[in-house]
Amino acid sequence: VDCASRRPAPQASELRAAMATSRRALLLALSTALLPGRRAEIVWGAASASYQVEGFREADGRQPSIWDAFDTPAIGASGPVRATKPNGKRNIFGGEDASEAVQDYKRYPESVSLHKDLGFGATRLSLSWSRLLSYSPGSLKATRNEAGIQHYRTVLKAYKAAGILTAVTLFHWDLPQGLLDPAKGEEGWWSRDDEGKPDGKIMKDWLDYVNLCFHTFGDRIKTWVTFNEAWTFTFLASG
């Protein structure tokens, strides 16, 4: 009870609605300040990356990516990417990994609701390459993972139903581990010919992946982001 007015305290749902209204008002004010007379052209939103938020990294047939090997000793123990430095310390501070993250793989409906509560009209998310395609040792062709495909269909449908514009990042650094194994001739984006020049070997795998995405999700997605910070993953990373 509000002791000053003797009125019942507002319910949680009322507070949530009031906060959402305040956020929308703030975004409109910011839009007006940034583009006077053209605020309708600004769409506010949020962005995420699959490996950073999804968790459930072994669910529904997903295979390891180079990030799994980079942060988890058991996964990277025998491969070219190791989770432990020569001095014994883990690559990630505190030995953390993304096996749990914020569990967006199962909790994406909450993410959709948060976008609406914040007054956001757009989102940018990435797809997990190794959740959509599997690379078996000795196989020359990737296998479609239908469970992963259906998952992203459902997620994209939820955002669309909520009226939230969705852009998709095709590659946010999580290369399938099967495509980075120098001992077997797989060197990811760093693949070179005998003269040390890029040989483009990965392009077939890349085109298989992006064509799958375009043909499978193109009815829901009109804005595609090819790479997230291409310089970063080619010059500062292993993949």
Image (cartoon, rainbow, N blue to C red):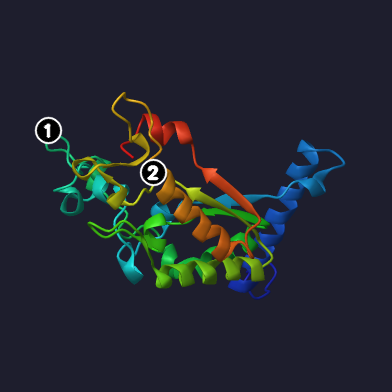
User: Would you say residue 120 is visible in this rendering?
Assistant: no
Percent x, y of residue 139: 27, 59
Rendered-image quadrant of the N terminus: bottom right
Can you tell which quarter of the image residue 222 is in? bottom right
Q: Is 213 situated above or below 61?
A: above
Q: Quadrant of the C terminus?
A: top left
Percent from the top left, x then y, of residue 151? 47, 70
Identify the residue position indicated by label 2 in the image: 202
Is residue 220 shown above or below 180? Answer: below
SS state under label 1 = loop
Please state which of the two labelled residues, at mark 2 or mark 1, is closer to the viewer: 2
* Circle 2: element type: loop
Q: Residue furthest top?
A: 195
Q: Does the image show residue 153? A: yes
Position of 24 with respect to 166 (left or right) is right
**In percent of the image, x 68 and y 54: which residue is there?**
23
Mark 2 closeness class: few <14, some 14–19, many ≥20 residues within 10 Å: some
| Percent position of residue 75, x then y | 20, 53
Give the amino acid type for the residue marked by disc 2 in the picture.
Answer: Ile
Q: Is residue 232 above or below residue 139?
A: above
Q: Is residue 178 left or right of residue 210?
A: left
Please state which of residues 142 and 170 is positioned toward the viewer in this rendering.
142
Q: Which mark is residue 87?
A: 1
Decide which of tag 2 and tag 1 comes sooner along the chain.
Answer: 1
Q: Is residue 88 left or right of residue 71?
A: left
